[in-house]
Image: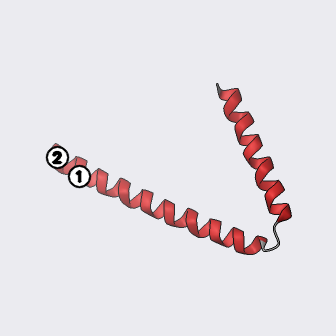
Amino acid sequence: MNTFKGIGACVVLAATIFVMGRLVHVEMVIHAVSLVLVAASTVAYLAALLRFRRDRRIAGD
């Protein structure tokens, strides 16, 4: 099963490289992807923090 994950990762990487080679505004795409990753990371961090606080409150700590 891990072999399929590795092959899938290679396919995604190859497709990304292929598409990036065809794009004209590569900088704009990289900027947009970076913004999406930062926003997703921030949301995930805040959700984890809220979950941690809720779990501690329920546990009575």
- Residue 58's disc is 2
Figure quadrant of the N terminus: top right
Q: Quadrant of residue 5?
A: top right
Is 47 situated above or below 38?
A: above
**Residue behind mark 1:** 54
Q: Quadrant of residue 36?
A: bottom right
Q: Position of residue 50 (x, y in %)?
A: 30, 57
Indicate the amino acid at tag 2: Ile
| Label 2 – label 1 distance at C-alpha | 6 Å
Q: Is residue 14 left or right of residue 59?
A: right
Please state the total of marks drawn on the protein image: 2
* Tag 2 secondary structure: helix
* Tag 1 secondary structure: helix
Q: Position of residue 11 (x, y in %)?
A: 76, 42
Q: Is residue 56 visible?
A: yes
Tell me whether circle 2 and circle 1 mark residues in contact (CB < 8 Å): yes
Tell me what residue is drawn at x 37 percent, y 53 percent: 48
Q: Residues within 10 Å of mark 2 (few under 14, many from 20)?
A: few
Tell me what residue is drawn at x 23 percent, y 52 percent: 54
Q: Is residue 61 visible?
A: no
